[in-house]
Amino acid sequence: ASGDAPTDQSILVSGESGAGKTETVKIIMSHLASIQSTGAITEDQGTLPRPEPAEEHISHNPRDNCVVRRVLDSNPLLEAFGNAKTVRNDNSSRFGKYIQLQFDVEDSTEAAYKGKTVPSCLLAGSYCETYLLEKSRVVGHEEAERTYHIFYQLLAAPQDVKAGIWDGLMGATTESFRYVGGGSGNGDAGADTLIEGRTDGEKWENTVDALETIGIVGDKLRTLMRSICVVLQLGNLEFGADPNNDDASVITNADELSKLASLMGIDAEAIAKALTFRTITAGGRGKESYTVPLRPASAKDSCDAFAKEIYARSFDWLVRTINEATCAEQNYDDAADVEEFGVIGLLDIFGFEAFQVNRFEQLCINYANEKLQQKYTLDVFSSVQEEYEYEGIALGDISYSDNAEVLRLIEGRMGLIAVLNEECVRPNGNDTSFVSKVKTVNKDTASLIDERLHRPTEFAICHYAGPVKYDATNFVTKNTDTLAKDLIECAATSDNELIAQELQNSVKAKAEQAAAAAPTLGRGRSGAVTVSANFRSQLTSLMHNIGKTKTRYVRCIKPNPEKKPIEVDLLSSTEQLRCAGVVAAVNVSRAAFPNRLMHRTALERFSCLSSESIAEYDEKEVDESQEEKKEDASVVDNNTSQHRDAVEALLGNVLKDMEAVGDDGTVAKAFAVGKSRVYFRAGALEHLETARLDALGVYAIVIERAARGFLARSKFLRHKDAATVIQSSARRLIARSKFQKDRCAATAISCWVRCINAKNELVRLRRERACTLLQTRYRIFVAVRHFDSCRSSAITIQKIARGSRQRPIYRAALQEAKEEAVVNKKIAALQKRLADAEMKLLKANGGAVQVVPPEAVPTYADAEEKDEDAQEVRQRAHTIDKELMDDSMEMINVLKKEVFELRSKNYLLRSDFDELKLSYQDLSSQYASVSLSYEALKQTNSEITKANKDMIFRATRDKKEFFDTKRQLTNENVQMKGELARLRSKLEEKERAGDAELARLRAENDRLKAKQGGHVPWASSTPPPSAPAMRRAEFNTRTATFNRGIISPEGSDNEEWKVVTPKGKSESRNPQASSGGRRRPRGTRGGRRDKGRSPGAQGRRKRTDREPSSPNGGRYTPSTARRPSTASTGYTGSSKGMPRVTSTTSLSEVTKGSRSMVTPKKKPTPSKNIVTPKGVEASISSSTATPTSAPKPAKKAASSSLALAASKGRSS
């Protein structure tokens, strides 16, 4: 602090996670703690000496050693309980803190009497406030992250220490507890994870030392650590459905429950009941209460909420203990003599956050950043306003972005916090209704973004750093943050004083806050304190305290997301500056006068633009060293006014062209001169710099001229000395070169002689080696020829012997097969004849069979001869037998009919069997032929594929020639049309001239008739044709002649096309005869004639040229393969046998400027049928126009047919 009245200071440190906010706060605290070591500062010292390290100061002043050490150790202690490893940062603060460093500031009047320019101050203590601890990290974290450091440090402690805290920690690792499991990757208590270059075991030692510094030792330390163990053990409880009640739950791992009961000093059944049941009070004031069971999921949520509440209360107790150990009111010895301590506040709070999914925590964080940004903008604007007022410059209207509307949307009467609190106290309040109310009430607010694609629980806010979309899921639950009464009563019976007292104190504090807030909420509303309301009150108090101080800002920027040294990501850094509000602050400061310079600097830089030099200004001013020692302020003011006048005169002349005249006649200069600085409007400083460069360029030319002269003279002298050295070296080099040449010549001669001798020796050796090789090859040739003759003789003998042995066997087998076939054929014929005879017999009888009954029965006849008395008996028996015989005959007739039907069916089946047998034999023979054809096709396919590649290459080349020729023909067509128009106009002129001549002749004829009495000797009964009619007839005759392929080469005014055949003959065509002309020959279709058809046949043709001409509906057959179509050969014949060129003629054969007759080809070139891999047949036309196409061999046609059939099979 300086001046008559010391002012409290605040340093606001902000930035995104991993930018270095925590390290910055520690550096600032260490620096401020070392200020008291500087002692008194006298007037003779002038400036503040460099501070000594805090450790050196502590050794000098033992009285303040304890306080300073506590202040410095409090920050790492808070890191152990409030920091965690995240994806972005290994030591990320998961809460916000405002540390107020309290100083014993010396009175400024007493310091002035002692000759001090700056009053001394001593660090007396500190006070810390925390905001919005992330409790959700206690019960869960991402795979690549960790929970708070204290859990891993406790598990990494020595075994004897863990045994003294709780027996359950003996041999425990991170995998032993679910809340911290997987933090180190291998379950070794996080030993492999380094935080700031140290392991968790080393961090544990530092944490214990820091706790000892603030007085947490012995039973206090054991109680604190056992509360942490309770949190760990709560995570190991497992809940399952009650077998007796589906709506209830039980704790399935009884051993973990017993460990928790022994750790808390509570009965296991009481803990289980508190976690699995919930007491509900009805009637408003506890008139009636009943207990309901919880489902497993609800019981697990209740357990997690209990663990989070215990850790939060332990953290608050630790912060309160730190404040009691470090506050100046209780620990500074001279606190009674100090009226008020000077305060330097350090705010380490979360930066602006915008993730893919933003929750309730992000809304609170961004709300705090909006408040700080408003403060930052107002401070920047105030500083600019104060600067302009001090300099005596009028400040016009400055526009800057104000986020007051966003703050009203969040904390206003009908803002987000108010609606959320109302939804929390309303029965059946939920997140969807909260979002709906917010959008309905604030629909006219521009900062609230409501899009159609938003879900019912989504809304967006346009913050100062950009729009952010929030997901309101669990907003009501997180904002309520209440703990069940059963758990609080259960915790109150614990033997852990920290848990029992802190949870009860928390309930009492919330009840007092609710009672205090109840009158302001209105009638019928509950006074429960929510998280957002509590955070808003804390934030309001924080801004109130900061508003009493002079604020400084520290913006921490993370250079790159990968945390690599010496690497800057410009896009990420710019985004962080925008989120920190630095860009908006720069815009405010540059609104009126973007650039500014000190008077002395402006004179030194731009004095070259004026006729007066800087020396003239220096003669008028007083030396600065003498000016500081003089006490008379009038000298300083006079010197400042001289600088100001000089700058104003200088810039007034230079920037006169940039002056702007307003509508009211006022002149607005491009600059403004203040007391100590000169301010420039946009573009003025750039104009001055450009003019300065131009002025300095004139002086630079003179300097360069002198420098170039000096350099040229120096260069000449160096070249002269070098020339002498070069001449001497050249003479030496020439003599040396001559000697070397003579030596090389002698060496070459001797080498040449040796080469000749070596060459002769080489020739001799080669001849000797060649003779040896000839002898060797000859002997080999003779031996091989003898061996081949012997082997061929042996093979011939073996073939003859095998043939003589196998030929009789084959003949016998063949004869046997023939005989068997003959016998089978005869048997089949006989069977067929028999069946036919039976069928004829049955048909002749009409299908009925008559049965002659027997005349008598021998048994009863004998009885009649022997016994006449039994006549009656025999008569009865005969009647019975007759009835039986009639029944038998009927049965026989029925059976014969069935036999006839079965024989008929058998005959039909035999006929079908014979037909099937014949079909099978045919199919077998066809299969054998197809197999042979397929093998031939495979062999032919490779040849066709190779030919196909060649054809594709030639087709590509012909295609290129086609486009070239097409371009030429287009140009010639244009020329032909112009020539045709010229000829038509010429013909019309001749017709008009002929008509005039005819009229003259007729008049002459009439005159002669009148003169000779109406008789002309040579006149006939038929009048002579007119001249136009004669010319028209001549033109039609030539056109018809051209269409037949014959035209007179001379005396024709029509342009012709020339087609060159392979034998060098040419074909001439008139443009009107082509398919693109206006005239079309008779009997053609689309500019083409049918193949050899008469006009009558052409008239009877129904299908178009694109229809297939084959009788099988366009399918490829060998017969069609032998006769290439006209489209494939590019030629069609006329009705008179004359050839002509169609539109499919190869355009590479067409040239211009020739007049000749079309000669038909005698030997046609057949088209080549190509089977592509997909089975598509392409016909490549020949390079010449041919009248007919010679048929291909039958073998190739069959192969093509089989290839097409195979390709169709594959495609189907």
Image (spheres, rainbow, N blue to C red):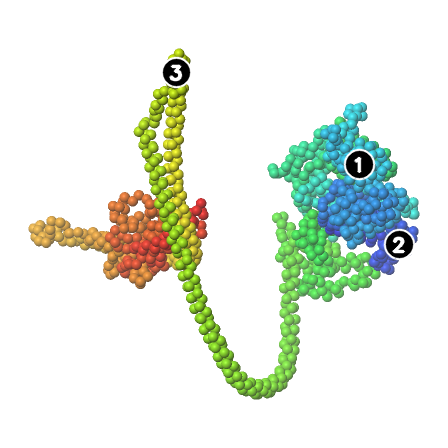
Q: How many marks?
A: 3
Q: Quadrant of residue 402?
A: top right
The residue sitting at 36% across, 59% down in the picture is: 1148
* Residue named by callout 1: 254
* Residue named by callout 3: 866
Separation of marks 1 and 3 at Cα, in angstroms: 115 Å
> Does residue 67 appear to the left or right of 809 in the view shown?
right
357 relative to 627, above or below = above
Q: Earlier in the sequence, mark 2 or mark 3?
A: 2
User: Quick one: quadrant of the C terminus?
Assistant: top left
Circles 1 and 2, Cβ within 8 Å, touching? The answer is no
Identify residue type, mark 3. Lys
* Residue named by callout 2: 58
Identify residue type, mark 2. Ile
Q: Nearer the viewer, mark 2 or mark 3?
A: 3
Toward the left, the furthest residue is 1013
